[in-house]
Image (cartoon, rainbow, N blue to C red):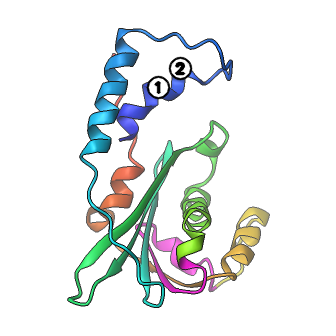
Amino acid sequence: MLREVTPLTKLTKNRVPNIILWNEAAEQDFTKLKAQLVKAPSLYTPNLSKPHQLYTDASATAIGACLSQNDEKGKENPIAFFSRKLTETQTRWATIECEAYAVIEALKRFDSWILRAEIEVISDHNPLTYLTLTTPQTAKLTRWTLALQRYNIAISYKKGVKHGHADALSRLPILVR
Protein backbone atom coordinates (compact mmCIF):
# COMPACT_ATOMS: atom_id res chain seq x y z
CA MET A 1 0.00 0.00 0.00
CA LEU A 2 2.97 2.30 0.56
CA ARG A 3 3.53 2.35 -3.19
CA GLU A 4 0.04 3.82 -3.71
CA VAL A 5 0.36 6.34 -0.87
CA THR A 6 3.84 7.74 -1.61
CA PRO A 7 2.88 9.96 -4.58
CA LEU A 8 -0.11 11.30 -2.64
CA THR A 9 1.92 12.13 0.46
CA LYS A 10 4.41 14.00 -1.70
CA LEU A 11 1.57 16.32 -2.73
CA THR A 12 1.22 17.47 0.89
CA LYS A 13 4.91 17.46 1.78
CA ASN A 14 5.32 21.25 1.84
CA ARG A 15 2.48 21.55 4.35
CA VAL A 16 0.63 24.25 2.44
CA PRO A 17 -2.95 23.22 3.26
CA ASN A 18 -4.78 25.05 0.48
CA ILE A 19 -2.45 24.37 -2.42
CA ILE A 20 -2.46 20.80 -3.68
CA LEU A 21 -1.65 20.30 -7.33
CA TRP A 22 -4.24 17.64 -8.17
CA ASN A 23 -3.67 16.20 -11.62
CA GLU A 24 -4.49 13.08 -13.61
CA ALA A 25 -1.60 11.13 -12.05
CA ALA A 26 -2.80 12.03 -8.53
CA GLU A 27 -6.33 10.97 -9.43
CA GLN A 28 -5.06 7.61 -10.71
CA ASP A 29 -3.00 7.07 -7.54
CA PHE A 30 -6.04 7.91 -5.42
CA THR A 31 -8.19 5.46 -7.38
CA LYS A 32 -5.58 2.70 -6.95
CA LEU A 33 -5.41 3.39 -3.20
CA LYS A 34 -9.20 3.19 -2.87
CA ALA A 35 -9.18 -0.15 -4.72
CA GLN A 36 -6.54 -1.52 -2.32
CA LEU A 37 -8.54 -0.40 0.72
CA VAL A 38 -11.69 -2.10 -0.57
CA LYS A 39 -9.76 -5.39 -0.87
CA ALA A 40 -8.62 -5.23 2.77
CA PRO A 41 -8.94 -8.54 4.66
CA SER A 42 -11.58 -8.97 7.33
CA LEU A 43 -10.29 -8.33 10.80
CA TYR A 44 -10.68 -10.52 13.86
CA THR A 45 -12.35 -9.24 17.02
CA PRO A 46 -9.74 -9.64 19.76
CA ASN A 47 -10.23 -11.49 23.01
CA LEU A 48 -8.55 -9.14 25.47
CA SER A 49 -7.77 -11.95 27.92
CA LYS A 50 -5.75 -14.01 25.39
CA PRO A 51 -2.15 -13.47 24.21
CA HIS A 52 -1.49 -11.36 21.11
CA GLN A 53 1.18 -11.53 18.42
CA LEU A 54 2.65 -8.24 17.22
CA TYR A 55 4.68 -8.50 14.02
CA THR A 56 6.83 -5.42 13.40
CA ASP A 57 9.25 -4.43 10.68
CA ALA A 58 11.19 -1.44 9.44
CA SER A 59 12.61 -0.70 6.01
CA ALA A 60 14.72 2.18 4.77
CA THR A 61 11.64 4.36 4.35
CA ALA A 62 8.78 3.03 6.49
CA ILE A 63 7.67 0.99 9.47
CA GLY A 64 4.85 -1.53 9.61
CA ALA A 65 3.07 -3.77 12.08
CA CYS A 66 0.36 -6.40 12.25
CA LEU A 67 -1.45 -7.25 15.48
CA SER A 68 -2.94 -10.74 15.47
CA GLN A 69 -4.35 -13.39 17.77
CA ASN A 70 -4.97 -17.12 17.59
CA ASP A 71 -8.57 -18.32 17.66
CA GLU A 72 -9.84 -21.43 19.47
CA LYS A 73 -8.66 -23.65 16.61
CA GLY A 74 -5.14 -22.18 16.72
CA LYS A 75 -5.54 -20.20 13.48
CA GLU A 76 -3.80 -16.83 13.55
CA ASN A 77 -6.10 -13.94 12.61
CA PRO A 78 -5.20 -10.30 11.96
CA ILE A 79 -6.74 -7.74 14.32
CA ALA A 80 -5.21 -4.53 12.99
CA PHE A 81 -2.52 -3.21 10.67
CA PHE A 82 -0.29 -0.16 10.94
CA SER A 83 2.25 1.47 8.66
CA ARG A 84 3.89 4.85 8.46
CA LYS A 85 6.56 6.52 6.37
CA LEU A 86 9.71 7.51 8.19
CA THR A 87 10.77 11.14 8.20
CA GLU A 88 13.95 12.13 6.41
CA THR A 89 15.80 12.20 9.74
CA GLN A 90 14.46 8.79 10.78
CA THR A 91 15.69 7.22 7.54
CA ARG A 92 19.25 7.93 8.74
CA TRP A 93 18.84 6.03 12.02
CA ALA A 94 20.66 2.76 12.66
CA THR A 95 18.73 -0.40 11.78
CA ILE A 96 18.26 -1.37 15.44
CA GLU A 97 16.75 2.06 16.13
CA CYS A 98 14.32 1.82 13.21
CA GLU A 99 13.26 -1.69 14.24
CA ALA A 100 12.82 -0.62 17.89
CA TYR A 101 10.88 2.44 16.76
CA ALA A 102 8.51 0.18 14.81
CA VAL A 103 7.82 -1.75 18.02
CA ILE A 104 7.28 1.41 20.09
CA GLU A 105 4.96 3.00 17.52
CA ALA A 106 2.95 -0.22 17.07
CA LEU A 107 2.52 -0.62 20.82
CA LYS A 108 1.31 2.99 21.06
CA ARG A 109 -1.08 2.49 18.15
CA PHE A 110 -2.58 -0.73 19.55
CA ASP A 111 -2.38 0.30 23.22
CA SER A 112 -6.11 0.03 23.98
CA TRP A 113 -6.15 -3.63 22.88
CA ILE A 114 -2.90 -4.83 24.37
CA LEU A 115 -2.08 -2.82 27.49
CA ARG A 116 -2.62 -5.62 30.01
CA ALA A 117 -2.35 -8.55 27.60
CA GLU A 118 0.52 -10.94 27.04
CA ILE A 119 2.24 -9.86 23.82
CA GLU A 120 4.74 -11.73 21.70
CA VAL A 121 6.59 -9.14 19.61
CA ILE A 122 7.94 -10.84 16.51
CA SER A 123 10.70 -9.13 14.53
CA ASP A 124 12.89 -10.11 11.60
CA HIS A 125 15.82 -8.24 13.18
CA ASN A 126 17.56 -10.66 15.57
CA PRO A 127 19.48 -8.02 17.61
CA LEU A 128 16.12 -6.59 18.69
CA THR A 129 15.54 -9.71 20.80
CA TYR A 130 18.28 -8.50 23.15
CA LEU A 131 16.76 -5.03 23.63
CA THR A 132 15.09 -5.85 26.94
CA LEU A 133 17.79 -8.28 28.09
CA THR A 134 20.91 -6.08 27.91
CA THR A 135 21.83 -2.46 28.52
CA PRO A 136 21.07 -0.42 25.37
CA GLN A 137 24.00 1.38 23.75
CA THR A 138 22.27 4.71 23.03
CA ALA A 139 20.12 7.11 25.03
CA LYS A 140 17.30 6.71 22.50
CA LEU A 141 17.23 2.92 22.90
CA THR A 142 17.42 3.30 26.68
CA ARG A 143 14.32 5.54 26.67
CA TRP A 144 12.45 3.13 24.45
CA THR A 145 13.46 0.15 26.59
CA LEU A 146 12.02 1.95 29.60
CA ALA A 147 8.80 2.61 27.65
CA LEU A 148 8.54 -1.12 26.86
CA GLN A 149 8.37 -1.95 30.57
CA ARG A 150 4.76 -0.78 30.56
CA TYR A 151 3.82 -3.84 28.51
CA ASN A 152 3.95 -7.59 29.13
CA ILE A 153 6.11 -8.43 26.11
CA ALA A 154 8.54 -11.05 24.92
CA ILE A 155 10.53 -10.26 21.77
CA SER A 156 11.28 -13.12 19.40
CA TYR A 157 12.96 -13.46 16.00
CA LYS A 158 11.43 -14.76 12.78
CA LYS A 159 13.18 -14.69 9.39
CA GLY A 160 12.09 -11.89 7.06
CA VAL A 161 10.79 -14.26 4.38
CA LYS A 162 8.35 -15.68 6.95
CA HIS A 163 7.41 -12.32 8.41
CA GLY A 164 4.25 -11.72 6.38
CA HIS A 165 2.12 -8.61 6.76
CA ALA A 166 4.55 -6.41 8.71
CA ASP A 167 7.27 -6.99 6.14
CA ALA A 168 4.95 -6.01 3.31
CA LEU A 169 3.78 -2.89 5.17
CA SER A 170 7.34 -1.61 5.57
CA ARG A 171 8.68 -2.27 2.07
CA LEU A 172 10.37 0.34 -0.01
CA PRO A 173 8.01 2.15 -2.33
CA ILE A 174 8.53 1.34 -5.98
CA LEU A 175 8.76 4.67 -7.72
CA VAL A 176 7.44 4.64 -11.27
CA ARG A 177 8.55 7.48 -13.53
**Residue occupied by mark 1:** 8
Q: Callout 2: 10 Å neighbours few (<14), some, many (20+)? A: some
Q: Please state which of residues 174 and 2 is positioned toward the viewer in this rendering.
A: 2
**Residue occupied by mark 2:** 11
Q: In this view, does 65 lie to the left or right of 96?
A: left
- The answer to whether residue 104 of the structure is visible from this angle is yes
Residue 114 rendering spot, x and y as whole percentages: 54, 78
Which quarter shows the C terminus? Answer: top left
What amino acid is at disc 2?
Leu
Farthest residue to the front: give it.
Answer: 45
Whether the magenta-drawn stretch holds residue 127 is answered as yes
Which of the 4 quarters of the picture holds residue 147?
A: bottom right
Q: Please state which of residues 85 and 80 is positioned toward the viewer in this rendering.
A: 80
Q: Do the residues labelled 1 and 2 touch (CB within 8 Å)?
A: yes
Q: Vertical placement of 108 versus 136: above or below?
A: above
Q: Please state which of residues 66 and 41 is positioned toward the viewer in this rendering.
A: 41
What residue is rendered at 74% in x and 77% in y? 146
What residue is rendered at 49% in x and 46% in y? 62
Residue 55 rendering spot, x and y as whole percentages: 42, 68
What residue is rendered at 36% in x and 34% in y? 3
Residue 153 rendering spot, x and y as whole percentages: 55, 84
Q: Which numbered marker is on residue 115?
A: none
Numbered range of the magenta stretch? 114-133
Which quarter shows the N terminus? Answer: top left
Secondary structure state at the residue bearing disc 2: helix
Q: Please state which of residues 117 and 131 is positioned toward the viewer in this rendering.
A: 117
What amino acid is at disc 1?
Leu
Q: Is residue 117 left or right of residue 40?
A: right
Gap between marks 1 and 2 measured at Cα: 5 Å
Secondary structure state at the residue bearing disc 1: helix
Whether the magenta-drawn stretch holds residue 176 is answered as no
